[in-house]
Image: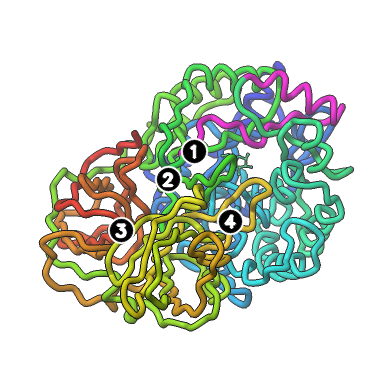
Amino acid sequence: MDRREFLRTAAAGCTVAASGSAISCGDAPAALTERTALAGPVGQNARRTGLTVEGDHFLLDGERFRIISGAIHYFRIHPDQWLDRLQRLRAMGLNTIETYVAWNFHQPTPSEADFSGWRDLGRFIRLAGSLGLKVVVRPGPYICAEWDFGGLPAWLLANSKIQYRCSDPEYERALDQWFDKLIPRLAPLQWSAGGPIIAVQIENEYGSFGNDQAHLKHIEGVLRRNGIDSLLFCSNGTADWMLRGGNLPGVLATANFSGDPTGDFDALRKFQPNGPLWCTEYWDGWFDHWGDNHNRTDPAETAANVDKMLAMGASVNLYMAAGSTNFGFWAGANYGPHYQSTITSYDYDSPIGEAGELTEKFTKLRAVIGKYAPLPTDPLPDLPPRLAPQTATMRSATTLFGSLDRLGHAVHRGAPVPMEQLGQAYGLIQYRTRIQGPRAKGKLTIQGLADWALAYLDGKFVGRLDRNTPSVGPDIAVAGESSQLDLLVDCHGRINFGPNNRDPKGINGNVLLHGQHALFGWDIWPLPLDNLDVLQFGAVPASFTGPTFYRASLTIPSTADGFLAFPNWQKGMVWLNGFLLGRYWDRGPQRRLYAPAPLWKAGRNDLVLLELHGAGSQIELHSGPDLG
Ligand code: GLA
């Protein structure tokens, strides 16, 4: 058996019979259901010494192994679609999948830890294993990932003194409590225990952020003490300071990059002269911010660069391999040089699209992988069915301001506080005060605004404020005895990358008139928008007077994937049968939101929009995406 054939079989997780002639690849049958998948090979291998390093290579159970992997986020894909997307990844020729674990997705409060339904990470990992895929887990606790607050829970922000991602005792206490719940669930799914997990990451791109080696050591300790015996690695950008800040002696260093691998692997080699080369995030696409153009990468170039890596004998994890969605309020944001929030789609221009599409990039990457590893022989999965186009007209409506007391309970505070101080994690937040008059015209500005505010004086719209232009605000005057000032704060994702990671939502400072005169005495309504059943809808108003919920319905013959568009609507969010699909915004680039099949019902489906700026009259259902 020559070297290339050896690598091809090892890379695909195939076993070679003692004679060296027979190859069995554990190919799963084409029409695999979840029941048959979960009854698959996990736990059946006898000799499990796991993933180890020998010279410049990996060994798995003592045999040469190369990781050809792709990133997929279970928290961004409806659980009824996990199997479908994993099958598509396998069809591309990958032998491994990689997922982050999003702490905030599992721990809504410090005392809870939810691993059920959509949060059943164990089921996701077992499903992958049952398809013959190995699994790399990146539990963070910080994950970046264009996910709200980089995966950290919002409740950490209730403590304004806590320092994240370092040896701060409060932070490490919170992370210990989380890992003591999470990691014992991962340990039995490791290779050594008959499961598919072969490697686990410590933190995430820590070197981009800081240099607290004791903190990395602490995380390593918590992983080990909770039973992780798999290979540990650190993954970082390849600048010298990133590699130095983000790695630990004795732990495998890996690299994240895009484009031609030569320079980045040279840098990694310089830092770590021996050991397998592993690109743990090969950015085969990129995410989008609201207001920017949709990012695309050239499929042929991407495939050529992956070819180059594989030809070098390197291992790779395609980030992302499966596109997915920032449902709910989960989309993150970046800062630099100003705040920019991430769109609802996390298609990422991945080889497998947000709705399971096998793209040109898929075909090209599959062909490249096929040069180094045997590809599954079963037919490629079909595109999941799509709904036929139709439109929906708004049937009823109710204003947000008229619904405040149904949606939340007001609390009184002297100065404004951000939502985390009130135990709120996501949604909008409304602030109301009275200003004594008469008062001459003065500029209204807000300190620590996150992220936009709609200002109303005595119920009349006076202007929009934006955290990126803190000195810009409307002039307001009080003619009579007093006026009521309302500020509805429209919050997008918390910053998930970089040093500006303390990003409480709402108002974290004072509301000023004349640039210096603070207004005190506020009623504050936390609006988590987690239960819209409380709303009382009435007739649709003739014209738009302010933030309003609109209701419509769509009747479909049977469930399938659909894409919702909002022509002439401006900015807001949309719920399908009570599930928040995410935010829409006429800024683009995204024009349609993915509404996956499992969220629909055969028959009548309920749609609710919360429009903040200006309403259209119809919603459109389309059969395909439009990411701009
Ligand atoms: C870094 C992070 C990832 C992700 C990518 C960009 O590599 O580690 O979580 O944010 O950038 O998509």
Q: Mark 1 highlights which residue?
A: 287
On residue 343, which mark appears?
A: 2
Q: Mark 3 highlights which residue?
A: 612
Which residue is at a point 66% across and 36% down the rendered structure image?
A: 280
The answer to which quarter of the image holds residue 108 is bottom right
Say what secondary structure mark 1 lies in: loop
In the depicted view, which residue is nearer to us: 121 or 209?
209
**As displayed, is residue 274 above or below residue 207?**
above
Residue 105 point in image, percent of width and height: 54, 62
Amino acid type of the residue that numbered disc 4 sits on in the rendered structure: Phe
Marks 4 and 1, the one that precedes in the sequence: 4
Which residue is at a point 45% across and 33% down the rendered structure image?
A: 349
Tags 1 and 2 in contact by the CB under 8 Å rule?
Answer: yes
Report the span colored magenta: 260-288
The answer to which quarter of the image holds residue 60 is top right
C-alpha gap between disc 3 and disc 4 = 24 Å
State left or right for residue 170 relative to residue 623. right
Labels 3, 4: front one: 3
Amino acid type of the residue that numbered disc 2 sits on in the rendered structure: Ile
Residue 522 point in image, percent of width and height: 47, 78
Residue 286 forms part of the magenta stretch? yes
C-alpha gap between disc 4 and disc 1 = 16 Å
C-alpha gap between disc 2 and disc 3 = 17 Å
C-alpha gap between disc 2 and disc 4 = 15 Å
Say what secondary structure mark 3 lies in: loop
Q: Mark 4 highlights which residue?
A: 149
- Whether residue 37 is visible: no
**As displayed, is residue 76 above or below residue 349?**
below
